[in-house]
Image (cartoon, rainbow, N blue to C red):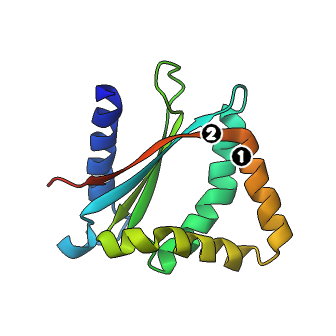
Amino acid sequence: MRFVLLIAAAGLSACSLHTRAGAPAAPAAERGTIAQIYYWRAKPGKFDEYTRYVRDSAEPIDAEGQRNGAFISVTTFITRDTTIAWTHMRVFVLRDSTQLRELSGKLDAAGVKLEPDSVKRRLRGEYSASLRESAGRATVAILR
């Protein structure tokens, strides 16, 4: 567990300092005060497929959600270390608790915008569920 917390802290530090190439550093208020971390474990034999799913399906939804103010930044960490409870850790850096409360709804809205067909969205959800299982989640404060 200490290792997971150490990795999460390192990830949060990296996320809070990360800026897009050529973009100025975010003002202090936009660096975030909290993060929502989701831990996922790829099902046996599904690591690469789930990694592709995150890149090809989840990241476009994230990008749309970010454009609409769902979060400040997101970083996905992966590990093949079988002694760790998770294989994919997704860290969403957020301004405040209001943004945290709105995160899920805004990401859902982004998914609807990118794929208006509810049947296709349901199938995408079923596909993702066939690739991974939840290994936990945490809301953490970002220490500066």
Measured as percent of width and height from the top left, residue 53 is found at: 69, 49
1 and 2 marks in contact (CB < 8 Å): yes
Q: Is residue 110 visible?
A: yes
Depicted 127 relative to depicted 57: above or below: above
Q: Residue at x 30, y 36 (%)?
A: 5
Q: Which residue is mark 1?
A: 129
Measured as percent of width and height from the top left, residue 32 is found at: 27, 66
Residue extending farthest to the left is 144
Q: Which residue is mark 2?
A: 133
Q: Residue at x 39, y 56 (%)?
A: 36
Q: Residue at x 69, y 58 (%)?
A: 57
Measured as percent of width and height from the top left, residue 110 is found at: 61, 75
Which quadrant of the structure image shows residue 62?
A: bottom right
Quarter of the C terminus within the rendering: bottom left
Depicted 144 relative to depicted 85: above or below: below
Kindly identify the amino acid type of the residue bearing the numbered disc 2: Glu
C-alpha distance separating marks 1 and 2:
7 Å
Depicted 97 relative to depicted 137: above or below: below
Q: Is residue 27 visible?
A: no
Measured as percent of width and height from the top left, residue 9 is found at: 27, 42
Q: Which mark is residue 137?
A: none
Q: Is residue 46 rendered to the left or right of residue 109? A: right
Q: How many marks?
A: 2
Kindly identify the amino acid type of the residue bearing the numbered disc 1: Ala
Which quadrant of the structure image shows residue 60?
A: bottom right
Camera-side residue of 141 and 17: 141
Counting other residues with Cα less than 10 Å from the Cα at mark 1, is it few (<14), some (14-19), or many (20 or more)?
some
Q: Residue at x 54, y 25 (%)?
A: 80
